[in-house]
Image: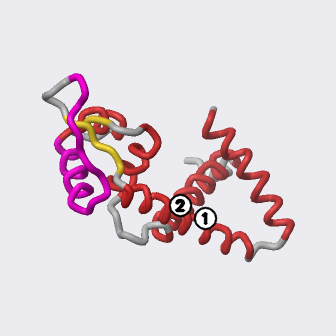
Amino acid sequence: MNDVAEAPNPTETAASELSLAIGQLVRRLRTEANPGELSWSQITTLARLDKVGWMTTADLARSEFVKPQSMGTTLSDLEQQGLVRRRPHPTDGRQVLFGLTAAGSEARRQRNIAKREWLLAAMAKLDPAEQATLMSAAALIKRLAES
């Protein structure tokens, strides 16, 4: 029996630490940037509609990897809150399109402002060398995400 423990692989350790750190940052950004207390499904649906424009329930469900029934519930909740509205599909009378209302666009804008303000305040607590390191790391993380 071998009693000598293998030394951890530095790359594996770094990957684990990076994954944990990014997860913590994302959760913190969600918390800080959710003044209206929207669910994650509602936030991502608003973001998708903001980016793409008017979509059917089925198209939204496919793009968010959820069941159409789940997306229907999310859209219904958002519609009750006045954040999305529906209109008839221009070529298929059986379908309905959903899009952001002015209030939905404003909710997205406020969320982005809250996220940016928290992140700027947190970054201001770092010294200049740490800020420079963070900017270099951001570029590397972006490259990883795009690979």
Please state if 127 lies on the left or on the right of 75 as rendered.
right
| Mark seen at residue 6 | none
Q: Quick one: label 1, few (<14), some, or many (20+) residues within 10 Å?
A: some
Of residue 1 and residue 47, the one placed in the foreground of this image is 47
**Image quadrant in which you'd find residue 90:** top left
Q: Which residue lies furthest to the bottom in this view?
A: 125
Q: Which residue is drawn at 19% across and 53% down?
A: 76
Q: Mark 2 points at which residue?
A: 112
Q: Where is residue 96 in the image (x, y as percent from the top left)?
A: 20, 36
Of residue 72 and residue 11, the one placed in the foreground of this image is 72
Q: Is residue 87 positioned above or below 119 on the image?
A: above
Q: Name the quadrant of the C terminus.
A: top right
Tell me how far mark 2 sits from mark 1, CA to CA.
6 Å
Of residue 94 and residue 13, the one placed in the foreground of this image is 94
Q: How many marks?
A: 2
Amino acid at the residue labelled 1: Arg
Question: The magenta stretch spans which residues?
Answer: 69-91
Please state if 117 lies on the left or on the right of 52 as rendered.
right
Q: Is residue 82 positioned above or below 117 on the image?
A: above
| Mark seen at residue 116 | 1
Q: Is residue 42 positioned above or below 144 on the image?
A: below
Q: Where is residue 6 in the image (x, y as percent from the top left)?
A: 64, 49
Q: Which residue is drawn at 33% across and 53% down?
A: 41
Looking at the image, do the residues carrying marks 2 and 1 touch, with CB atoms under 8 Å apart?
A: yes
